[in-house]
Amino acid sequence: MKIGIVCYPTFGGSGVLATELGMALSAKGHEVHFITYNQPVRLHFHPNVYYHEVTVPTYPLFDFPPYETALTSTMVNVINNNNLDLLHVHYAIPHASAAYFARQILKKAGKDIPYITTLHGTDITLVGKDQTYAPVVTFSINESDAITAVSDNLKEETYKYFNIEKEIIVIPNFVDTDRFQHSNKEHFKKMLAPNGERILAHVSNFRKVKRAEDVVTMFAKVHEQVPSKLLMIGDGPERQNIEEYCRTLNICNDIRFLGKQEQVDEILSITDLFVLPSQYESFGLSALEAMACGVPVISTNAGGLAEINVQGVTGYMSNVGDTDDMAAHAIEILSNDNKLQTFKANAIAHAKTFSRQRVIPLYEQLYDNVLANYKATV
Ligand code: GMT
């Protein structure tokens, strides 16, 4: 099959998932064409993978260069030149409406191509439902030949906020358990925690929705009772404020801000506890990747997190903002070696239920169904 994938190329979960999906499909023999404005961060060379960059020519008249127009035109060209069978767009804004427009342009020229929209999170729960975007988002989701959501929770949220006339199919996110597994990186651990301190980690794009300041607040409480270090991985709008906050708490020496990291699996291999105190997560891919590396998770119970973090088994969940509860659970796990080992083993076992091998066939089956229905109706 020849598949076009449209996504954000950044460290965000939707781009990561789309890239991992494309790479996995290419390894299974499909020809995959990524269409986006930068090379996706997790994209590696494979003979079946193509990358088409969307460039947006500027002009003095444009205060806002028209990315969506450039994206749509690139989609049309790539589909025509490579004879693609279907388009799979990740994150509705603006990818679903660009796909709809591309499909209409191609129809005029006698070529029909279906598009599938995968909803990831804030394209629905924050940005998408804003009235500035909602009419276009609703229309272009409804026009999709199939709609998928990454969790049951996101499916429910989508039905709650949008007038969706079609079935939303839940295909959960997956993790590459060949790459995300515990590996021996003791030399790193010794450098970061020379006295055998426990290591806690947080990975995010430091947007407000991640509540990364709660990581620091809960860490300060844990740190009082358990010798520990905190690794803050990623970058984004709140990072400066949070660094400033650490300075006011006087625990800077035990917190490292590592910025954006590509080898996050190596860092997770030296981590004892992953912390994700988000206001909302449709899924929480970063937590799943941590679990696959044998790291228990302290998270909130918001959104779809309960679909991956099993209370008292793979970690614990607390109400949003309840950093006392998060710290109490963290201390419980970290101060007992046997308990920590049990949680680690449970995390690995549960992550395997979201393995690439289990989830990719669900997408392949969907592609087959969409193509079969599409050919039958056009
Ligand atoms: O919606 C976003 O915040 C962006 C998106 C991304 O690109 O990082 O994250 C969402 O999609 C991920 C992959 O499906 C999910 O694991 C994240 O939970 C989800 N983020 C939110 O819902 C806040």
Image: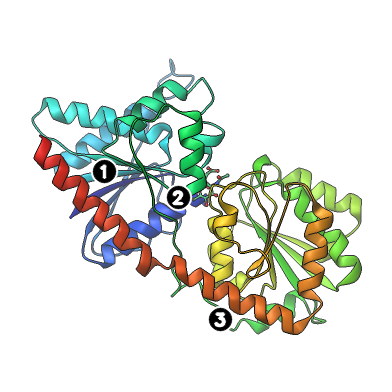
Foreground of the two, 269 or 300? 300
Q: Which label is found at residue 183? A: 3
Report whether 137 appears left or right of 336.
Answer: left
Foreground of the two, 278 or 165? 165
Q: How crowded is mark 2: few (under 14 residues within 10 Å), some or many (20 or more)?
A: many
User: In the rendered view of the protein, which quadrant contains the N terminus?
Assistant: bottom left
Q: Give residue 302's position: percent from left, percent from top.
A: 64, 47
Residues tagged 3 and 1 counted as in contact (Cβ below 8 A): no
Say what amino acid the circle numbered 3 marks: Ser
Q: Residues within 10 Å of mark 3 (few under 14, many from 20)?
A: some
- In space, the residues marked 3 and 1 are separated at their CA atoms by 36 Å
Q: Is residue 309 visible?
A: yes
- Name the element at disc 2: loop
Report whether 218 appears left or right of 58.
Answer: right
Residue at figure coordinates x 55%, y 75% from the top left: 348
Say what amino acid the circle numbered 1 marks: Leu
Mark 2, residue position: 150
Residues tagged 1 and 2 counted as in contact (Cβ below 8 A): no
Q: Residues within 10 Å of mark 1 (few under 14, many from 20)?
A: many
Q: Give residue 12's position: percent from left, percent from top.
A: 52, 49
Say what amino acid the circle numbered 2 marks: Val
**Rendered image quadrant of residue 101:** top left
Q: Give residue 322's position: percent from left, percent from top.
A: 79, 50
Q: Is residue 183 above or below residue 242?
A: below
**Rendered image quadrant of residue 100:** top left
Circle nearer the N terminus (3, 1): 1
Q: In this view, does 232 lie above or below 128?
A: below
Circle nearer the N terminus (2, 3): 2
Q: Which of marks 2 and 3 is in front?
A: 2
Q: Give residue 33's position: percent from left, percent from top.
A: 27, 50
- In space, the residues marked 2 and 3 are separated at their CA atoms by 28 Å
